Amino acid sequence: MDHVSAGGIVLLAVTALLAGVINAVAGGGTLLTFPALLAAGLSPVTANVTNTVALVPGYIGGIAGYRRELDGQQARIRTLLPFAFAGSLLGAALLLTTSERIFKFLVPILVLVAALLLLLQPRIQRRLTSLHPETGDIVVTDHDIATRIGVFLAAIYGGYFGGVLGVILLAVLGITLSDHLQKLNALKSVLQFSINIVAVVIFALWGPVQWWTVLLMAPLSLLGGWIGARVAQGLKPSLLRSIIGMYGIVCAVVLAFTLH
């Protein structure tokens, strides 16, 4: 498998499995797999595109789990998908056409932002819950320009890097739409998958994807998601989120020194 050592292969396999579990329980699996791909010897851009392609199958399970909450949201999805597709296309194009030196400069910042957002996720969700109570009559707002712009900007980030994209999308939807939080979570899952699948197509056609790595990691991330969905009841997402968030901060600091 190219120049990756046996230890590197084991590292990728373990982190892919754990990322599937983490994404199912708390989110933030990218903060595990992206540094692992760098440690295995992949360049930052190659690690980023390979990571996106390898983990995208796991989002299908999230959509399947929200089938009931997606009922009645077809108009929303049709309205927002073009902005998700366009933003992801732009983000992926920026990644592949700009200097890798720029990406190396941005990687520690992006990892740090993703880690901080993961740590702040409970506070964000509490705020959104206060804005969108789960009982009583809910007035669902129309899709205004703020929602479309927010989804477009989040999709650019998702196409370019994508770490903790779900937290960003949920914040955008929660601030600009008024509805049950679970319905917004379901909509977020569809948009997140759509953003990533566009990036995957672009990367598969023109990106430096390490396909043997995808073949190794994708099934394990799917398996991890299946395991995570079943053990989530026995785990504390808050504890796992804190551990991964702190790990991400440490990775950001290390990357800031090693990539420059």
Image (spheres, rainbow, N blue to C red):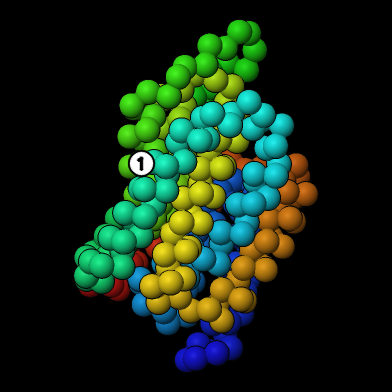
Q: Nearer the viewer, residue 141 or 115?
A: 141
Residue 259 shows in this picture: yes
Q: Residue at x 56, y 59 (%)?
A: 56
Q: Nearer the viewer, residue 158 or 134?
A: 158
Residue 248 shows in this picture: no
Q: Residue at x 45, y 36 (%)?
A: 80
Q: Residue at x 34, y 67 (%)?
A: 254
Count of numbered labels shown in the rendering: 1
Residue, disc 1: 152
Q: Residue at x 41, y 32 (%)?
A: 172
Q: Quadrant of the C terminus?
A: bottom left
103 left or right of 24 in image: left
Question: Residue 17: x percent and y percent?
Answer: 65, 65
160 left or right of 224 in image: left
Question: Residue 112: x percent and y percent?
Answer: 35, 53
Q: Nearer the viewer, residue 113 or 158?
A: 158
Q: Is residue 212 above or below residue 72?
A: below
Q: Quadrant of the N terminus?
A: bottom right
Question: Residue 190: x percent and y percent?
Answer: 56, 42
Q: Quadrant of residue 181?
A: top right
Task: Assign a secondary structure to mark 1.
Answer: helix
70 left or right of 153 in image: right
Q: Is residue 211 above or below residue 136?
A: below
Q: Nearer the viewer, residue 153 or 31?
A: 153
Q: Residues within 10 Å of mark 1 (few under 14, many from 20)?
A: many
Question: Residue 117: x percent and y percent?
Answer: 42, 43
Q: Residue flagged by tag 1: what amino acid is it?
A: Phe
